[in-house]
Image (cartoon, rainbow, N blue to C red):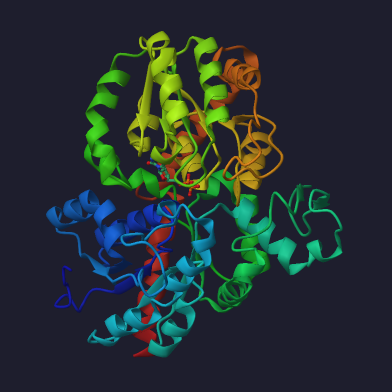
Amino acid sequence: MTCFREESNKPHFVLVPLLAAQGHLIPMVDIGCILAERGVRVSLIITPANADRIKPTIKRAKEANLAIEFVELSFPNVKFGLPPGCDSIDSITDRGLYRAFFEAIYSLDEPLEAFLGSLERPPDCMITDMCNGWTGPVARKFGIPRVIFHGPCCFYISTDYNLVHHKVYDSITDENEYVIVPEFPIKLQVTKNQTPGFLNSPLFEDMRKQCLEEELTADGVVINTFLELEQLFVENYEKVIGKKVWTIGPICLYNKDFEMKVGRGNKEAIDQSHRVLTWLNSRDAASVLYISFGSLAYTNPQQLMEIGNALEALNKPFIWAIKKIEMKPEVENWISAGFEERTKDRGLIIVGWAPQMVILSHQAVGGFITHCGWNSLLEAISVGVPMITWPRFADQFVNEKLIVDVLRIGVSLGVKVPNFANEDGVMVKSDDVREAVCALMDGGFEADERRERSNDFSDKAKKAVEEGGSSYMNFTDFIHYFTEHQARSK
Ligand code: UDP
């Protein structure tokens, strides 16, 4: 652990990501680095296996002399019956262990208290993931102002908040029945199945309740989005939650050069990155289709082969990210028995972690089939890549509506029910994938307009994080707000 305790004149923020999923950890690490660049001393709480994944970022932060320390708390795997080295939910194959995994996370309050107790003075602010309800009592014990970090966009958070607050689901009899989201700026219809809310299973009821209560008592909220993208929904959330909301994104744009993009999230991508870059450099502008379903959702062999058939029929260059866990023998055999050979002049399969930011930000990429995780969407928005949407679970169905219906920068594959582990076999036929890709990438009035809108949002995203931009200014205001709070309470 690097220690910056001597820099006591700097404001000090402690960051507690949800140490369960890359989609929660990655943006928090970016926030930590941005804060450190903006003159804040940062302590980011992490566990050993997660620290190992983001080793390149930790190394770079040290080399750049950023005032960020990565505080490793040991993860109690054995105590909670979890496999060794499993600090993240993507390393759990037995879903029966999810509850034990979250209990292990919720038991980190003691080591966090020990760390905070070792400091000369309490930090000025704690930024904690919405799903970390356990950090509320810790922050109160040390008198630390606490800000919630929400991973998704305001469009989703506001939807979820309004549905819960108005108890809309109490009166439904069918989880596939459409309901109208109350107190929302536009008419939005969702089903409970599509929008169950985070941690919403009887197994997690106590934790969910605690998180919702802690959201209400927090001192503010930071969100990875930008005003020019969804101002109506930011204002709606700010109004219903009744507290300060700082939009500070897209924080992925902090990663400017190749090294930063490659090292982001998982050191595994480094091995692939030069091969990927050389391959992309040889392609025409906006010609490549990229396919990835994020870090958690997985796709069964039949569905993978269905996607593969579409890629083959399309005759377009593609980069296809397939998770190691998805590479079952039948998939491997199918790839090596002909698919690879038939697409070798135009296809690149990445098995394992793909350097997503390197791929999306390359000018050769012209379309993205995505599961609609908010980080992935915002990464594509930041660089002006239009999308084909295939939501799988959590916030993703609502995010899809923002992308397709409101911002009009995506084409939907029409999936209506959750399919986290693709339990129901083939959900999307190869012909549907093919048609959507043609609609997105083969030109024509609608496609051109969509691409133009995507480029326009990309320009606005970049401006938002530049000096003087809305997110840049919000960052400044956010830091001052808590620095002054500390000064006032002295
Ligand atoms: N990601 C990546 N390579 C992969 C898979 C995911 O870099 O092979 C990154 C992606 O860029 C994003 C995050 O992991 O930053 C995934 O977050 P998202 O919210 O999109 O989806 P989740 O995985 O949480 O469902």
In the depicted structure, whether residue 165 falls above or below residue 180: below
In the depicted structure, whether residue 462 falls above or below residue 279: below
Q: Could you tell whether 230 is left or right of 5 in the image? A: right
Quarter of the figure with the N terminus: bottom left
Image quadrant of residue 317? top left
At 43% from the left and 30% from the top, the residue drawn is 329
In the depicted structure, whether residue 379 falls above or below residue 91: above
Image quadrant of residue 360? top left
Q: Nearer the viewer, residue 388 or 385?
A: 388
Q: Nearer the viewer, residue 467 or 165?
A: 165
Q: Could you tell whether 100 is left or right of 273 in the image? A: right
Q: Nearer the viewer, residue 261 or 302?
A: 302
At 49% from the left and 63% from the top, the residue drawn is 97
The count of marks equals 0
Res 177 seen here: yes
In the depicted structure, whether residue 284 falls above or below residue 348: above
Give how far across and how far down residue 55 sits, in percent: 22, 53
Res 387 seen here: no
At 46% from the left and 20% from the top, the residue drawn is 334
Quarter of the figure with the C terminus: bottom left
Q: Nearer the viewer, residue 130 or 451?
A: 130
Q: Could you tell whether 437 is left or right of 364 in the image? A: right
Give how far across and how far down residue 8 sits, in percent: 19, 79
Give how far across and how far down residue 253 sits, in percent: 36, 43
Q: Quadrant of ligand 1?
A: top left
Give how far across and how far down residue 432 sits, in percent: 65, 21
At 42% from the left and 82% from the top, the residue drawn is 139
